[in-house]
């Protein structure tokens, strides 16, 4: 492996997050949505440090170079490069935030700090603080404790420096105030003359420092924000007497003690205060110290209030029905004769819930099996499964307890479903279950007929409103029997199943995808039609990258749409001239996985839960499903074509182009997400 052949995974991810930041900078994006993109950028960065930076740091601390795993980079050098890039991007995000705030002022929306409070706001601010904020404050006097009490991961704190007069001497006292998270970060102050005012709770606390510390005789007081990010890996115990379920619960609790991997601080903080904190917390130079602005946890901007300003938000779209499916009638009766594709958020997610609710009530339905990765906080999916169990159905749920950052939510629902008689399967030891599948058994004319669905995304009502995902509803008995085999593997996992239709990780995906690529190479050499078109979230598996390089060098044309990480270098002479890569970042999060192989004119089309990452191919249970219905195949490729034609929100991420350059082509402006919605709107009119 050489650094020239691959883009490092971590660096590629930072390039992706820069595309998110581009949306915050884009003046054509509504103002409040730009703020929310800043929040997404910040939230992404938090998760990056908890997971990816922490991994590289562990490699470095183990004394290993990590070059093989890190695409030719040495771990120590990579840590330094990441920190440099992040500092630069943080500075850019602060510049964008300042610009947005100025633009909001022109729209009569002011975000004020503690020095900009007007007389008519004082009583409200004081009362709000005393009634809602003060009771929730945790204040730690650092001078009187030997070590700093455990700072919570990604929580924001105000580091207070107070110059107190004690017996005629001025003594510096250092204090930490934890910013409460059970109160909205944004406080809407009384408006005046059509002018709206927002105050961050951080500044509301700063304004009331005199109230908090009125028992001290101090000469001056200042407060600057700091935040610590901790390693989010789960350390599983080896205790054989503990159940897997209990080990996960304990591991999630232990995560709060993870090692620090990033310390972000207000660059205006006094040096003595910063030094005091770092020494007290035992943070050394191996941790990533990131100077930032006045405010941290900018992820909270994802929930910035809309203030009734519809013109500063994206127009809401009404999720469309799937043509041919009536929410009022039986879905199963329709599926008996034809497959249907649901493409959220263009289509309503309600069909997924409707399918399970119908199965829960239908007396002919005897069993339901489903895989669950991430559930919504309030889940109609879980409620439907519990309802089915109460109605005497045999309900089996494979629920992934190690869905990162959703463990607590999944544990809560697992406990609830188990109490209600749902049979739970906690996957396979050493393998995350990332597949998105469901199969039901229905007794028809004394024979069991199967119905089900396979999806590229989570069965989550909330993310379905903003994530693009395909869900295939089918009664194809061969596909559904294969899904049942996946569940059989969960229960007897020393027996590796054979599948007639599905491509299933970890045993067959890599081998089968390589076969499909080899077929395109052979077809091209034989003068037959050949082409590969792939859409996924991330592409980082070096062996699959090498295989596409081989196909490119053989002359096969390859189109890739990759939203996030892409370690492949496209358009490199002698290596990848025939590969083009674009990334689309827009209103919705592109989450679909779609694979197309020309196959000498008899095209093969698949939807999948799997990206082409090593973890998806070798270390997870994933399902890739063929599309047999010719109308659906055409529909899926139509949506790919629309995405490929995007010249508004697509970025060219080929090696030959500047970093994240917008793909501007002549002719009509095509913003693919809006065009896909119009595509489905027109289908309803046909």
Image (tube, rainbow, N blue to C red):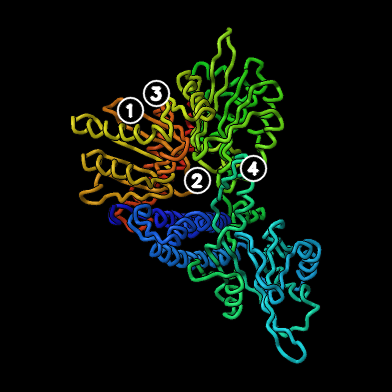
- Asked whether 68 or 390 is in front, the reply is 68
Element at badge 4? helix
Q: Are marks 2 and 3 in contact (CB under 8 Å)?
A: no
Work out whether 588 lies above or below 304. Answer: above
User: Percent position (x, y) of residue 102?
Assistant: 57, 67
The quarter of the displayed image where residue 358 is located? top right
Query: Label 4: which residue?
Result: 246
Q: CA distance from mark 4 to mark 1?
A: 47 Å
Q: CA distance from mark 1 to mark 2?
A: 27 Å
Q: Are marks 3 and 4 in contact (CB under 8 Å)?
A: no
Element at badge 1? loop
Query: Label 3: which residue?
Result: 630
Q: CA distance from mark 1 to mark 3?
A: 10 Å
Work out whether 225 lies above or below 398. Answer: below
Do we see residue 26 in this rendering?
no
Query: Label 1: which residue?
Result: 603
Work out whether 399 lies above or below 68. Answer: above
In primary-sequence order, the first of circles 4 and 2 is 4
């Amino acid at each position: 492996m050489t650094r020239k052949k691959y883009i490092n995974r971590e660096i590629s991810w930072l390039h992706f997050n820069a595309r998110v930041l581009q949306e915050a900078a884009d003046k054509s994006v509504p103002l409040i949505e730009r703020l929310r993109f800043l929040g997404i950028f910040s939230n992404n960065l938090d998760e990056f440090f908890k997971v990816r930076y922490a991994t590289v740091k562990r490699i470095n601390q183990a004394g290993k170079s990590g070059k093989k795993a890190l695409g030719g980079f040495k771990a120590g050098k990579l840590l330094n490069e990441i920190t440099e890039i992040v500092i630069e991007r943080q500075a850019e995000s602060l510049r964008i935030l300042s610009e947005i705030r100025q633009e909001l002022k022109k729209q009569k929306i002011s975000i004020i700090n503690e020095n900009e409070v007007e007389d008519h706001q004082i009583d409200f601010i004081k009362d709000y603080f005393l009634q809602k904020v003060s009771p929730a404050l945790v204040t730690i006097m650092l001078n009187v404790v030997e070590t700093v009490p455990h700072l919570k991961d990604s929580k924001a704190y105000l580091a207070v420096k107070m110059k107190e007069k004690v017996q005629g001497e001025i003594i510096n006292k250092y204090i930490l105030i934890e910013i409460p998270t059970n109160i909205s970060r944004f406080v809407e102050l009384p408006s005046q003359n059509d002018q709206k005012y927002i105050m961050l709770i951080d500044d509301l606390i700063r304004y009331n420092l005199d109230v908090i510390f009125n028992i001290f005789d101090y000469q001056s007081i200042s407060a600057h924000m700091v935040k610590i990010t901790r390693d989010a890996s789960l350390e599983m115990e080896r205790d054989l007497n503990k159940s897997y379920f209990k080990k996960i619960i304990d591991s999630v609790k232990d995560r709060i003690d993870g090692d620090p991997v990033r310390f972000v601080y207000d660059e205006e903080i006094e040096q003595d205060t910063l030094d005091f904190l770092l020494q007290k917390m035992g943070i050394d130079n191996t941790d990533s110290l990131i100077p930032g602005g006045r405010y941290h946890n900018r992820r909270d901007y994802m929930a910035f209030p809309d203030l009734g300003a519809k013109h500063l938000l994206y127009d809401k779209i009404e999720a469309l029905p799937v043509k041919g499916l009536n929410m009022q009638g039986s879905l199963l009766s329709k599926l008996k004769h034809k497959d249907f594709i649901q493409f959220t958020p263009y289509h309503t997610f309600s069909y997924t819930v409707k399918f399970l609710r119908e199965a829960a009530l239908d007396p002919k339905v005897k069993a339901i099996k489903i895989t669950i990765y991430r559930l919504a906080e309030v889940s109609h999916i879980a409620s439907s499964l519990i309802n089915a169990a109460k109605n005497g159905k045999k309900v089996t749920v494979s629920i992934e307890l190690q869905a990162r950052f959703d463990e607590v939510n999944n544990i809560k629902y697992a406990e609830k479903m188990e109490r209600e008689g749902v049979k739970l399967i906690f996957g396979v030891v050493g393998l995350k279950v990332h597949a998105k599948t469901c199969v039901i058994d229905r007794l028809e004319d004394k024979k069991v007929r199967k119905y089900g669905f396979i999806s590229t995304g989570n069965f989550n009502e909330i993310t379905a409103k903003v994530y693009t995902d395909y869900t295939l509803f089918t009664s194809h008995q061969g596909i559904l029997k294969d899904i049942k085999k996946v569940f059989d593997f969960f229960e007897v996992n020393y027996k590796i199943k054979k599948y007639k239709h599905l491509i299933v990780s970890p045993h067959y995906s890599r081998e089968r995808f390589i076969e499909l690529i080899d077929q395109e190479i052979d077809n091209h050499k034989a003068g037959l039609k050949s082409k590969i078109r792939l859409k996924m979230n991330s592409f980082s598996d070096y062996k699959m990258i090498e295989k596409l390089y081989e196909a490119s060098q053989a002359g096969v044309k390859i189109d890739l749409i990759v939203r996030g990480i892409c370690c492949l270098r496209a358009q490199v002479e002698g290596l990848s001239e025939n590969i083009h890569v674009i990334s689309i970042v827009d209103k919705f999060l592109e989450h679909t996985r779609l694979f197309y192989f020309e196959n000498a004119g008899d095209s093969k089309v698949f939807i999948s839960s799997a990206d082409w990452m090593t973890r998806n191919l070798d270390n997870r249970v994933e399902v890739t499903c063929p599309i047999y219905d010719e109308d659906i195949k055409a529909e899926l490729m139509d949506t790919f074509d629309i995405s490929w034609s995007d010249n508004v929100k697509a970025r060219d991420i080929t090696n030959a182009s500047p970093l994240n350059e917008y793909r501007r082509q002549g002719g009509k402006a095509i913003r693919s997400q809006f065009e896909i919605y119009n595509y489905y709107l027109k289908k309803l009119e046909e």
